[in-house]
Image: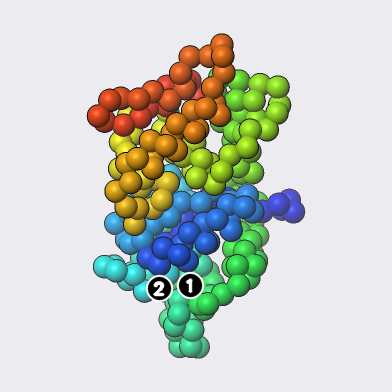
């Protein structure tokens, strides 16, 4: 396996501060990260894409982590279970339910990263799907490294929020995305009703994608939301 081990990870955690910290840390290390706070959001994500690994909190509102773990492992998705319950019996229970590994909270981000990579390494190179780049109107976006470059190869600096927003658009080109949907996709299921925040984020992203000779990349549908109208290909 190459030295750089990355993949697409789903973080299932109802504590927003922990979830955001894990999201940011893994994203900085080349992973494509999506988040969920309960089993319903997990099912929605699983219906839209595949994951190389799920980081799953044991104690969740509604369906508990052990039940979700059984469903994930039945589909062949490896699970790294995390929990404040760190006794030997708790770890054995999690592993017996099919988890690939069990990490007690609080944990060091570096240890989390090491365990994530160890799970993916054990599954072998074929278990990690290659992540193609997105190509649109002269831009190239590499989701594995979260890098956007223009037609001349110059890097375009993006904030973490702009990276999540661009990813949401590129995964759904041509689809009308409401403000609520964009909030959910970029901030998770605990996002508040901040319509204006999405408007400002889209405006900033538009400015960075603007080229004098190009037509609009993100279209505003008045009263409904936004649509990424630029043709998108993968390479």
For residue 195, above or below residue 81: above
Mark 1 Cα within 10 Å, few/some/many (few <14, many 20+)? many
The front one of 34 and 64 is 34
Please give the count of numbered marks on the rendered protein: 2
Give residue 202's position: percent from left, percent from top: 43, 34
Q: Residue at x 35, y 40 (%)?
A: 196
Which one is earlier in the sequence, the residue at label 1 or at label 2?
A: 2
- Regarding residue 141, the answer to whether it shows in the image is yes
Q: Tell me the number on the disc at residue 58.
A: 2
Percent of width and height locating residue 32: 54, 48
Asked if labels 2 and 1 touch by Cβ distance under 8 angstroms, the answer is: yes
- Residue 54 seen by the camera: no
Quarter of the image that includes the C terminus: top right
- Colouring method of the image: rainbow
Q: Give the left or right position of residue 222, taking residue 96 as reference.
A: left
Residue for badge 1: 82
Name above or below for residue 158 compared with residue 7. above
Residue 48 lies in quadrant: top left
Q: Residues within 10 Å of mark 2 (few under 14, many from 20)?
A: many
The answer to which of 36 and 1 lies nearer the viewer is: 36
Outermost residue, top side: 213
Q: Find numbered disc 2 in the image and state the secondary structure of the residue it sits on.
A: loop
């Amino acid at each position: 396996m190459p030295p750089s081990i990355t993949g697409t990870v789903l973080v299932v955690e109802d504590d927003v501060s922990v979830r955001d910290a894990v999201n940011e840390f893994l994203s900085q290390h080349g992973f494509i990260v999506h988040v969920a706070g309960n089993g319903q959001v997990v099912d929605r994500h699983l219906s839209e894409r595949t994951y190389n690994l799920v980081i799953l909190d044991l104690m969740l509102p509604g369906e508990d982590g052990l039940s979700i773990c059984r469903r994930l492992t039945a589909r062949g998705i490896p699970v790294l279970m995390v929990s404040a319950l760190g006794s030997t019996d708790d770890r054995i229970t999690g592993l017996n339910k099919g988890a690939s590994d069990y990490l007690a909270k609080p944990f060091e981000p570096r240890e989390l990263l090491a365990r994530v990579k160890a799970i993916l390494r054990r599954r072998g190179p074929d278990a990690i799907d290659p992540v193609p780049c997105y190509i649109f109107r002269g831009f190239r976006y590499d989701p594995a490294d979260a890098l956007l470059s223009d037609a001349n190869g110059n890097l375009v600096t993006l904030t973490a929020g702009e990276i999540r927003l661009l990813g949401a658009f590129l995964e759904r080109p041509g689809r009308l995305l409401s403000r609520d949907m964009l909030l959910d996709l970029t901030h998770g299921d605990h996002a508040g009703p901040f319509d204006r925040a999405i408007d400002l984020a889209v405006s900033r992203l538009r400015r960075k994608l603007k080229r004098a000779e190009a037509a609009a990349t993100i279209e505003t549908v008045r009263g409904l939301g936004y649509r990424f109208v630029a043709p998108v290909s993968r390479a």
